[in-house]
Amino acid sequence: MPPTRTGTVKKVALLIESSRSYGRRLLRGISLYSRTRGSWSLLHQEMTMGDSVPDWILRADVSGVIARVDTHNIGPLKKLGLPIVDVLCSRSNLGIPQVETDDHAVARLAFDHLYERGFRRFAYCGYRGAHYSQARLHHFRSCVEEHGCPLTVYETEGDRGKSLSEAELPGVLDSDPLTQWLLTLQRPTGLMACHDIRGQQVLNVCRQLSIAIPDDIGVIGVDDDDTVCPLSDPTLTSVRPDADAVGYCAAETLDAMMTHGASPPSVQHVSPIEVVQRHSTQVFAVEDPELSRVCRFIRENACHGIDVAALVRFSNLSRRQLERRFRKHLGRTPREEINAVQIRRLKQLLDETELPLEQIAPLAGYNHTESMSVTFKRETGQTPGAYRRQQRLPKPRAEMLRESNRE
């Protein structure tokens, strides 16, 4: 491929869906590269995952393309004769550079999170025809086997030869077999869903079956979709990939191709950022049914002013038995468990709202702002105000700033 003339504004076509959170973050990362290092003219239209290559790309004098490449568009894209970078990576040996999230690291984060919550039985729910689902299952299985734990798998049947959208479609229609599978799971089980949409489907079925989440089944998804996760009931814990960095790295790769000519095909993997914990895994899994029942009562009522005496009235155990079981299985007292739930709620309110401390205190179960602040500082080492200010600070993208990735 001939290099683009220097001094000209490069037009870059972005064939990336904006219907999914991951796609929007890809676009954000590409935009950051363009603003800071590329000075490109970015051409993009509203689209979904399965859309065809738009006609305008033939008339737009495009210099390069970043696309979610799949069976439906690989042929037309290659006919353009332009530098292309793939950010879907559903097919290997395409002869073009690819940038994708590191699914091994994703599965490791998901497993470690569930294991740290006390789960020792695991399940995976995905799609047989989707490349990312198969990759995450493979790595999740390795993590489970490494720790000598059992794993149960449910996959919707799909055709590996079809596009990703077609591979995922049967999952919308398989609530009956998914229901039957979930009923077979022993409790408690830690379940990884291949992505957040699948995780929401699992939570919906569990709610219909009155399966207690997260006491019976703790659920974690992938993508940290800012629409799907908060709308799930309960809210969905998720692995947050660094899709911004994937987009930035893809833009960097394309820039080198457009400037210096052809680049050898390669696959670059970008590590995920973190697990964003929400209610679907806010538990320490225990085999003791009565202790699990009490812990659920604490989660549901800790912010309504309950004390240990209220737990004793609710439980079938005496206060001494309750204290002993909490220390044996959880390594803390009932009072400490109540405090922990209140602190989590307080952090959520500080993160997600602009409410003053006077209004936050009663929502987190405190009668006085002063006692809330003292408890929060004792447990976290920060005042509520300092914690809130810290959460507002922008977090640097290490993958985008690494000097080794720069020219």
Image (spheres, helix red, strand yellow):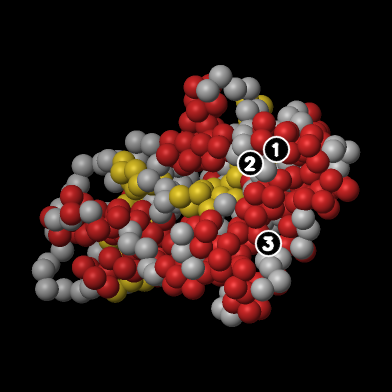
Mark identifier at residue 332:
2
Residue beneath label 3, please?
Answer: 231
Looking at the image, residue 72 sits to the left or right of residue 93; the answer is right
Single out the mark in the foreground, 1 or 3: 1
Residue at (66, 78) in percent of width and height: 359
* Residue farthest toward the top in the current orientation of the protein: 148
* Residue at image point 71% right, 66% down: 365
* Label 1 residue SS: helix
Q: Position of residue 404 (x, y in %)?
A: 18, 50
Q: Give the CA separation, mark 1 to mark 3.
A: 32 Å
Dot 1 crowding, Cα within 10 Å, few <14, some 14–19, many 20+: some
| Residue found at the very far front of the displayed protein | 320
Q: Quadrant of residue 34?
A: bottom left
Question: Which one is earlier in the sequence, the residue at label 1 or at label 2?
Answer: 1
Q: Position of residue 233 (x, y in %)?
A: 73, 56
For mark 3, give the secondary structure: helix
* Three-letter amino acid code at the position of disc 3: Leu
Relative to residue 55, is residue 183 depicted above or below?
above
